[in-house]
Amino acid sequence: MTTLLCLLLGAGPLLSQLVLSPVHGSDNATLPLVMWHGMGDSCCNPLSMGSIKKMIEEAIPGIDVLSLMIGKTVIQDTENGFFMDVNEQVSMVCSQLGGQFLRAVAQRCPSPPMKTLISVGGQQQGVYGLPRCPGESSHICDWIRKELNSGAYTDIVQKHLVQAQYWHDPLNDDLYKKHSLFLADINQERVVNETYKKNLQLLDKFVMVKFLQDSVVDPVDTEWFGFLKTGQAKETETLQESVLYKEDRLGLAAMEAAGKLDFLATEGDHLQFTDEWFNAKLVPYLH
């Protein structure tokens, strides 16, 4: 059976998401890498996903790397990162593979199974603020902020604006839990889906990377599954202090007890890392 090794680079829900997946064959075979970008990027940008693809191929000779395109063209791929329902995107990825977004794939599509999930700057608990919206079109970022502030949880905004689907408002917790189409579902905010919980625990490793000077993700603690405490927007809590963990609604407490959660931190702003850091810290997980 094919196994999946997944790497997510994030700055939206996961702004640039990389999925790494293992090839058909024996357990000793090199695992193929499936990469998934996020908001403001595309599958084949030579300055981002293309560069990372090349770096991995140089570090692991013979590895097969697939960079997912959500749409039929690079332009559609970029636009869909802003406006396509994340649930539809996850379904498309599940179909492409035959089996914040890649974690949803792990929870919803256990075949082919993922071996390792690596989230690099990904927003596991969503965001509450877009301090430096990525992408070349600033007017799009300005429009997104306006829409989110005025009605992130209305049906039309939830269905047509990707950023609204991982918008987590701690001041309107009931509204978030009731109307969030994507994040509240995969984070088990309404009910506990035992299938999601079981599938995520099938991972050998779930690795989360936090950028200590991140100016894009707000709050930065979301990169380690932490978030703002409910009812206010100043104090944060860690994953281990959250209800999600204490009630083990997603299986993360059990995974940490089993040594399956790794928390890495690095100096620098969002997705700012050197080839040396990437090779030393992340490439070992790809073998």
Image (spheres, rainbow, N blue to C red):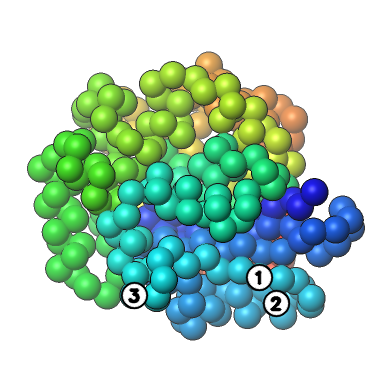
Residue type marked 3? Ile
Mark 3: which secondary structure? Answer: helix
Q: Is residue 242 visible?
A: no
31 w.r.t. 181: above or below: below
Q: Quadrant of the C terminus?
A: bottom right
200 w.r.t. 139: above or below: above
Which residue: 43% across, 63% down? 70
Q: 272 left or right of 28?
A: left
Which of the two residues, 95 or 280, is positioned nearer the viewer here?
95
Q: 200 left or right of 170?
A: right
Kindly identify which residue carries mark 3.
Answer: 75
Kindly identify which residue carries mark 2.
Answer: 57
Which of the two residues, 93 or 163, is positioned nearer the viewer here?
93
The reply to whether discs 2 and 1 touch (Cβ–Cβ < 8 Å) is: yes
35 w.r.t. 221: above or below: below
Give the spatial CA distance, label 2 vs label 1: 8 Å
| Residue 200, position as x, y percentages in the image | 62, 35
Q: Residues within 10 Å of mark 2 (few under 14, many from 20)?
A: some
Residue type marked 2? Glu
Which residue: 63% across, 49% down? 99
- Mark 2 and mark 1 lie on one chain; the one further toward the N terminus is 2
